Image (tube, coloured by chain):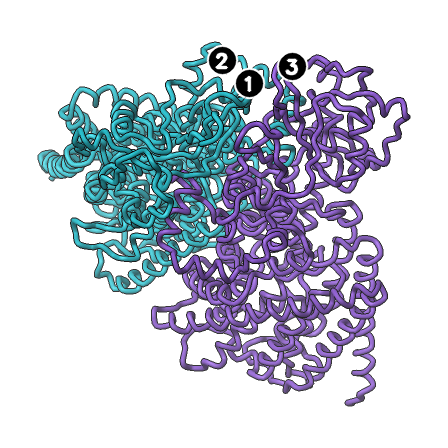
Chain colours: A cyan, B purple
Amino acid sequence: MYCYCRYLRAFGVFAISNFVLAMMAVSITSYISPAAAGSGIPEVRAYLNGVDAPEIFSPSTLFVKIVGCIAAVSSSLHVGKAGPMVHIGACIAALFGQGKLHKYRLTSKWLKYLNNDRDRRDLVTCGAGAGVAAAFRSPVGGVLFALESLSSWWRSSLLWRSFFTTAIVAIVLRALIDVCISGKCGLFGKGGLIMFNVTSTTITYHLVDLPLVILLGVIGGILGSLYNFLMEKILQTYNYIYEKGIGYKLLLAATISIFTSFLLFWLPWFASCRPCPDETNGSCPTIGKSGKFTNFHCPPHYYNDLASLFFNTNDNTIRNLYSSDTNDVFDQLSILLSFVTSYFLGIVSYGVVAPAGLFVPIILTGAIYGRCVGMLMGSKSSLDHGLYAVLGSASFLGGTMRMTVSVCVIILELTNNLLLLPLVMLVLLISKTVADSFNGNIYDLVLKLKGLPYLEGHAEPYMRQLTVSNVVMGPLRLFNGVEKVGNIVHVLKTTGHHGFPVIDEPLNSGAPVLFGLVLRSHLLVLLKKRDFLESHNPMSFHALKEYSFDDFAKKSWGKSERVEDVELSLEEMEMYIDLHPITNTSPFTVVETMSLAKALILFREVGLRHLLVVPKSSGRSPVVGILTRHDFMPEHIFGLHPFLTKGRWKKLQFDRSPLIKYFRDILLGTGFTSRNSFRSEF
Amino acid sequence: MYCYCRYLRAFGVFAISNFVLAMMAVSITSYISPAAAGSGIPEVRAYLNGVDAPEIFSPSTLFVKIVGCIAAVSSSLHVGKAGPMVHIGACIAALFGQGKLHKYRLTSKWLKYLNNDRDRRDLVTCGAGAGVAAAFRSPVGGVLFALESLSSWWRSSLLWRSFFTTAIVAIVLRALIDVCISGKCGLFGKGGLIMFNVTSTTITYHLVDLPLVILLGVIGGILGSLYNFLMEKILQTYNYIYEKGIGYKLLLAATISIFTSFLLFWLPWFASCRPCPDETNGSCPTIGKSGKFTNFHCPPHYYNDLASLFFNTNDNTIRNLYSSDTNDVFDQLSILLSFVTSYFLGIVSYGVVAPAGLFVPIILTGAIYGRCVGMLMGSKSSLDHGLYAVLGSASFLGGTMRMTVSVCVIILELTNNLLLLPLVMLVLLISKTVADSFNGNIYDLVLKLKGLPYLEGHAEPYMRQLTVSNVVMGPLRLFNGVEKVGNIVHVLKTTGHHGFPVIDEPLNSGAPVLFGLVLRSHLLVLLKKRDFLESHNPMSFHALKEYSFDDFAKKSWGKSERVEDVELSLEEMEMYIDLHPITNTSPFTVVETMSLAKALILFREVGLRHLLVVPKSSGRSPVVGILTRHDFMPEHIFGLHPFLTKGRWKKLQFDRSPLIKYFRDILLGTGFTSRNSFRSEF
């Protein structure tokens, strides 16, 4: 009866289907939209911080993200669906925010009011929150995730809007589950609105269990930061490989897929067959459906516990691990083997060029880790192993993602057991604190690897020793209020700047005055309209009425105008253009002697793209320079001032901490709120 | 047997004990700390917005708040404990933040690092969150309440800190409940960590129930805004009465107390006695303890349902209303009577000069309202009346408090039933939307009545038509870098300003230059130290080292230095003082032509107290004026520009909305994030 060919054939089917699905995910990502690779959460975070990475919200990215995510998750790769769902939600929101989908004839009149950055960012935040809410069926968790991990600015009306979005998600989910309750929709709706309902028994715990929970948190924190460290190294290696070409991307994915199939299929052979428990009448072993007791290669009435963990959907595996009164279902060796597998597969799989989330692998690995600890404790602890699994997930999430409130609420909404709250909170806090002392959170690492200029909300100590004039550099390009077309075209072609100061020569006296700031995109609109003047005389201000709202609306993503597209005759180049109507006459300014730290606070809090630097004393040009996001990046500052090593200033900070701390507060906020570390731990 | 004297005697005991407790609460509040009256949430909100109301966090306020709240709640007044608990939490945090309690010899070295505004505000936020967490045993709800309703600025590290605080609250509560489980602690710990556990049965609802839930939300919103409207009128009347003296405060409280006792005792006589249901073996009627079936004046085996609602702790009443499978326990008339009583008693009781919360009365009234609707529906709906009560609470909270996420999470944590989430969310959103179209939330109304200058985060439309030079007024007082002591004392005595620009006359050229901003409190420190110069020569900058961190630390609440306390000889008055070491050399500045709306954004986002206005053209004084919080208040602006009526600008805004909306966005945020309504709906 024991013909090994049968098993080999089974392995073949398993491995080949996995391989085909994985290759499909990787190839559509590589060829159609490389921006869809990875979880997408770092990109959404960067976008909400003000970084418009190209193509991250394009329709092709959305398509690849949806199809690729389904393929990647189905291919047994150890990747999750939550991150891609956040990105999908953000994408859909962003496409709404474009206001017009000319290609698809879906132009709506009221949608065009969304053609500005603020409303788009609000929409994207809501969409991303909806993604989390849908992924975990966790509406409050979705709002908190958007607040804690995604957005860089927050206002109360946004809280209310994102809450509205996730409420709709919850209601639609509930309605769909109502429709699907008869089993027409496959696995969907099986768990009800609560995915991992572990309330079947009343879970009890007491004060004496606290040390154990603390230990769980500490180890979880260490494991989590190690996970981040290894992840960073692996991703760096992958990036190096990927630079060599698309072929290498496919090759690496193929290797990982085959390796994964191999592990998942052959590892369960190491686990021994276990007899079915008596009380399960008929449902053990579970054949032809997913359940706790997978038969695999075992004789009838026996099951293979490792196979039950591997040959299951991730959701089902987590549910099995979370369920209570199952202390004897899993063997110690199986749990240990599956922990090691899950931990390392999670690290190597994320870097694949396909839509791949981190959340589910981390929850799963954490749950197995929790069970591990529970088994090692044996009879020394009275806690249920299902509870250990929940706490293990929490500690591992805290150790890698470093989120607190949102993870806590998501776990609560996943498990529907509020009595766990104190323990989950405790374990999260401990694991986060432990892990924070080693390295940063996983999204920051990915963000840094991608090279996105994320602007932190707090000023570094060395910034307090610099003034803005220390970092402003490069030749400044100014325009006059009425400027020659040729000059404008020349400046636009020779620089990459997005904003230019406009100065006016007053009629009576000599010194020029700063009139305002004009944006490259608005200049291009004027150039395209060929709205030129024959002479140097400025138009009257009512000329503004010639322009309509639509002309200046922000264009869709990835469709920025280029100056090369504007073709002007030599005659037109000699004409003049009146910049007054399109100039922002109230740009934010700082004096050149302003401390860099305070300028950063202004820049970040008010959410600027350009900050004009004006001279302290009169008699010079009315503008000294323009600060942009890049001027605040540590790389830029250290490049200009190499003597500022981080270590030195850190040391100094500790030495003189009380006085510095106080005077920093005075200097930074006129004594009231010097929020120099505002939103610092995103 | 039916001797009415017995009932009269019972009424006497009831009314007198209520009266004594109420009078005690009111008199300690009136005589010791009037700042402790009311819920305290508006004051905490204002403090976190930057308004330091006197005495709100003093030890006497804390004492009165604790004792008074216990007395007021015990006196059967229809007031809650949640608001005072928020204030108590904030008070305790603020006392920690003082860094030293010299009086009580509790000076700790590390506590003095908290002597600045930012850390104090963080502490107070955490303390207030802990108060909510303790009041409702709702840790996540506490964090969200602090975020949504209290704080004006938020950063991620504060989220994490307040979460830590509430986690500790949850763990301590859990431990105390563990200790008290044997019944040693009275009523405490009876309900476990979950106060109103309604998970005893699985609550079911379907799509067909949605219209009913929507209706519940709409009516709840109308009732809620009516509640706010009536509350405002009543509070205005009370304020008018209270101005006449403390005697009137006591008289009013006495009237309300007697009226309340009268209603509570005699109203149940209108309710008929109901026979005990069969299945309750022995626990009906409940005599000598609180329960669902109060005997009152009924014969044995009968109970009075109205009395069970009135003669109970608020918590117990809410639990009774929330519990499922009790559709037949309450009579229609009783519920209607208790709704009217609870609604109007809640309105008249809040204004009493005693620590009094709004949360619990509103939850209770809402629960009764929900039951009302459930009864009116009768057999037309299959929803459980307990569920109606929960939804009624949610809709009424949404209609009065206008909070969404925090109320939703608090209700979830109160009832431990995540399956309710979609319905609770829906009902909250609807009732908030309906109520928002009538008036503002209840805390805003109280804030306005108290006259606290709360700075909204969004700019009003008319502000876009003004420049800062339109609102800056009054004679500006400047100091020279080295200033005569006499001048400083004179200016400090004759003005109430807290910040003064410092200007320097450069040695070479003529035009004076702005050096920075000096604070009144720092000037007073220098005057007290008598650190004077004989001549006009400035000290060298290292003189800063003579001052220690402690000298400039912000003093405890209510202990601001006064210039009258500094006694100087005539000789000293003729000496000079070097202001350079204590001047903030990088104050935030705006040009006089800056739009007022943008200046408000800068002021509010960065959290300033003073904003210097500099001239556009050179050759004049280097400072035009100082903007403070009061310059942005609508009263001030309308006083200066009476032609700016709100209505007119509102109309204008609608007329030209698309273009204005877009150009507002360009003008306000350089195109990137024009967050002019940042945190607008607090």
On the rendered structure, is A138 left or right of B37?
A: left
Task: Tell me if label 2 and label 1 are in contact, CB under 8 Å.
Answer: yes
> In percent of the image, x 77 and y 45: which residue is there?
B58
- Quadrant of image for the N terminus of chain B: bottom right
The tally of labels here is 3
Q: Position of residue B218 (x, y in %)?
A: 46, 71
Judging depth in this view, the residue of B82 and B218 nearest the camera is B218
Q: Amino acid at mark 1?
A: Gln
Q: CA distance from mark 2 to mark 1?
A: 10 Å
Residue type, numbered disc 3: Leu
Residue A98 seen in render: yes
* The label number, if any, that marks residue B507 in the structure image: 3
Task: Where is residue A186? Give x, y as percent.
Answer: 22, 55
Residue under label 1: A465
Q: Is residue B188 left or right of B2 when viewed as pictured?
A: left
Give B677 or B505, whichever is nearer the viewer. B505
Output the chain of dot 1.
A
For discs 2 and 1, the disc positioned in front in the rendered view? 1
Please, is residue A243 above or below residue B314 in the view? above
Q: Residue tagged by mark 2? A: A644
Could you tell me which residue is drawn at 60 percent across and 30 percent down? B620
At 62% across and 20% down in the image, what residue appears? Answer: B510
